[in-house]
Amino acid sequence: MTTLEQLGVTADLGAGAGFKALWSLLAILAVFALRWALVRAVRGGAEILTDRQRWWISLIKNLATAALFAGLVAIWADEIKAFALSIAAVAVAFVIATKELWLCVTGATWRGASQAFSVGDWIEIGPHSGEVIEENLLATVLQEIDPHDFSVTGRIIWAPNSLLLTAPIINNGFGKRFIYFQFDIYTEPHAGAAATMARIRDALDAATAEFHELARRYAARIERSAGAKLRDPAPRVTAHTTDLAKIAFRCAVFCPRERAAAVRAAVMAAYLDGGPPPPGGEMTK
């Protein structure tokens, strides 16, 4: 059976431990007080933080954590060195027990090296979607965005950084303001399908008229930044059939993210107000 002496823990290991514990407590209090003061100074009296403020707050917290860790290691260096003389099996067991933590740290290293995203970007990590509001060694914090109506849900997601190594990361950075949004209106085949399609197109044009020119300028700006040609931002309606022999009118538009749900609702309302639905009804997706 392994004894404490075999692990390097001797009777004199605790010599001066009380003094070092006091220094450790003072270091913790000092770092947390300084972090609180700096975060408060950056935040000011703002209720809604800007991307720049969130970036500085995230940086302050990460630097405070690193400084506290380095300080505690320096204070307890002798004790750590003595304990490090333990047998290799203890080290292996420790690595296995903390595997998930090491994966999180590795994921944070990958994130920093790849620059895949930063605070303020709208990203998708596996099933999670939201705006990055904080980054640290163990987790990426997201302000959740509903993937269906693109509104902020108010929920905060703490995604462990280990997900960065196993799940694809989608950066919707340019979609933070404008997105390519499309939805389908399904109906039974009928003789007035062409007139229905024209009515849907008119409704889509009307719903997007107020920001149409802004959408063109924003799309041009993205093209210059990305160095690639994007799809035409003009609203369009196309028709196709489904496997169930129904007609699907596909509406596509480049619009502000927060207006996507309103555009879909306006087009659907105009479609329904155009007359009674054909046999079999209609639905949207």
Image: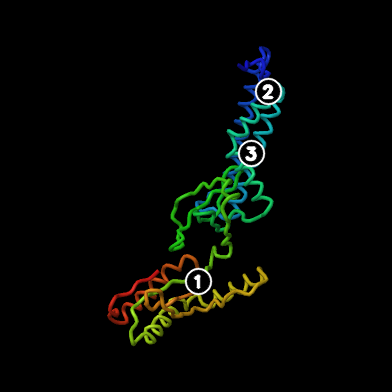
Q: Residue at x 68, y 23 (%)?
A: 86
Residue 64: mark: 3
Quadrant for residue 278, please give it.
Answer: bottom left
Mark with earlier residue (3, 1):
3
Q: Mark 1 packing: few (<14 Cα in 10 Å), some, or many (20+)? A: many
Q: Nearer the viewer, residue 189 or 235?
A: 189
Mark with earlier residue (2, 3):
3
Cα separation, mark 3 vs mark 1, equals 41 Å
Mark with earlier residue (1, 2):
2
Q: Amino acid at mark 2?
A: Ser
Q: Mark 2 packing: few (<14 Cα in 10 Å), some, or many (20+)? A: some
Q: Secondary structure at mark 3?
A: helix
Q: Amino acid at mark 1?
A: Cys
Q: Nearer the viewer, residue 153 or 27?
A: 153
Name the residue tied to disc 2. Answer: 86
Task: Mark 2 vs mark 3: give the one in front.
Answer: 2
Quadrant for residue 29, please give it.
Answer: top right
103 is higher (above) or lower (below) than 266: above
Q: Residue at x 47, y 65 (%)?
A: 258
Q: Residue at x 29, y 76 (%)?
A: 280
Percent coordinates x, y for residue 28 in the rendering: 61, 30
Q: Secondary structure at mark 2?
A: loop
Name the residue tied to disc 1. Answer: 255
